[in-house]
Amino acid sequence: MGTLVKLAIAGLVVFALLQLVRPDIPAKPAAAELQASPEVRQILEKDCYSCHSDEKRLSWFDQIVPGYWLVRKDILAAREHMNYSTLGLKPAAVQKAALFEAVNMIQLGAMPMPRFLALHPDAKVTPEELAALKAYLAPWATVSSQPGAKTDAAPSASAEVPAAVSLAAVKPELNGLAFDPSFEGWKPISTTDRGDNNTFRLILGNDVAVKAAQAGNVSPWPDGTRFAKIAWQQETGSDGLVHPGKFIQVEMMVKDARQYKDTEGWGFGRWRGVDLKPYGSDAHFANECTGCHLPVRGNDYVYSLPVTAAKVSRAEVVNNAAAALPPGLPYQPLGWNAITMYVDPKTRTTATLYGNEGAMSVVQAHHGSAQPKEMVYPEGAVLALVTWAQREDPHWFGARIPAAPQSVEFVQAAGAGKPAVYLRFAGAQLLEEHPEPSAAAERTSHLLGLAPAWLP
């Protein structure tokens, strides 16, 4: 018997013995499945249940070791992240959020996993199926009736807000990431109107992040980059505008490719509620973050498109359209701090109120007071309200982000006893307009009456 034959026989024996090393993949009946329409359930069962359920659905070739070991590992990891056999045990809002995440994973090409589709082409989600899932979710179908308290009027500078917490005393995240109390002084990177859960997101960046965005140095972002994503529940006022309401949480991302190599170069943290309690039960919560951000790994795992005039070679990495403010404006407010934001669902526009240093000194003095007085801006303080059209967020179904600017309004404080100066620039070219005195006074009052979005 030749050497090659002996080796072949030995290989077959080893291969046969390996088939006996077969750790179990648990299977059991569904405890409570996702509450959804039959059409949606059918799509999910066809395309997702092989990995994301307690059913055991293996093709014959999935049974062969060593491939079986990889299949088992993927299935157990998939069940831990999302299990449709138990999802129905969770609140309806959690079920809805899970389905939105699934749709986003599908449309960004992360799910079903490409290597799984290579061997299981029947699990491919067709365009028609994806459209059906989106139609079922319909994030903007009830935009006129946002959940959350219906206020009797638009939030104003005299509205009562919760007392501030001591940011210096906030505990680190369970993975060791320290809370950065300086985030409230960071500059805006972008804003998001989330129709999937009726929240607002304001994304702030530290100096490293802002400079990187201005230079287009965002893929990858440089070490030292820090983001803070602040979330509020939406509230609709009697003015018909949707304002930030109850504070929900602040999330942070810190770029350090070496320190956080196990989580794609980023340190992740989330602090929820007015007491800023660290999220999760242990350090493994970060796996949720990396799993959620996986579809945008081509953008260095960052979902947000920074508002910047910098040009980059790839599409949908930065948001140039929102940054298109003419250089002839008396001020360039996109480099200022943000005070608040709102959305007009009738015109499908979003607006952010910015303040220069003089204005922010008043805002910061106002911050943390349980019953603040009406804010009075000193001479030299300037407010700027930038209003954009909205467009669908290409990275998240159910979200909208700023598109082309529609108008820029300025209110220049003139000091005690003196009327403020109102300036308005609007239209495709953002040319200066000269409204009637009554209209100018109304808009001045509107800008001055906008209360800061509450921060902890």
Image (cartoon, helix red, strand yellow):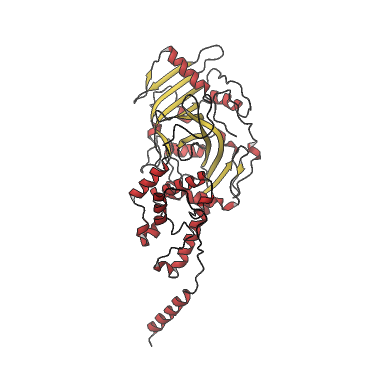
Residue sitting at the far front: 38
Q: Quadrant of the C terminus?
A: top right
Q: Position of residue 385 (x, y in %)?
A: 46, 25
Q: Position of residue 149 (x, y in %)?
A: 54, 31
Q: Which residue is drawn at 56% across and 45% down?
A: 269
In front here: 66 or 217? 66
Q: Which residue is drawn at 40% across and 55% down?
A: 47
Q: Which residue is drawn at 49% across and 62% down?
A: 73
Using the image, determine if residue 386 lies above or below residue 442: below
Picture quadrant where residue 158 is located: top right
Q: In this view, does 445 lie to the left or right of 405?
A: right
Q: In which quarter of the image is the N terminus?
A: bottom left
Q: Is any atom of residue 265 visible in this view?
A: no
In front here: 93 or 283? 93
Q: Position of residue 453 (x, y in %)?
A: 54, 30
How many marks do you count on the picture?
0
Q: Position of residue 157 (x, y in %)?
A: 56, 23
In front here: 14 or 98? 98
Residue sitting at the far bottom: 1
Q: In this view, does 161 lie to the left or right of 24?
A: right
Using the image, determine if residue 413 lies above or below residue 58: above
Q: Is any atom of residue 309 visible in this view?
A: yes
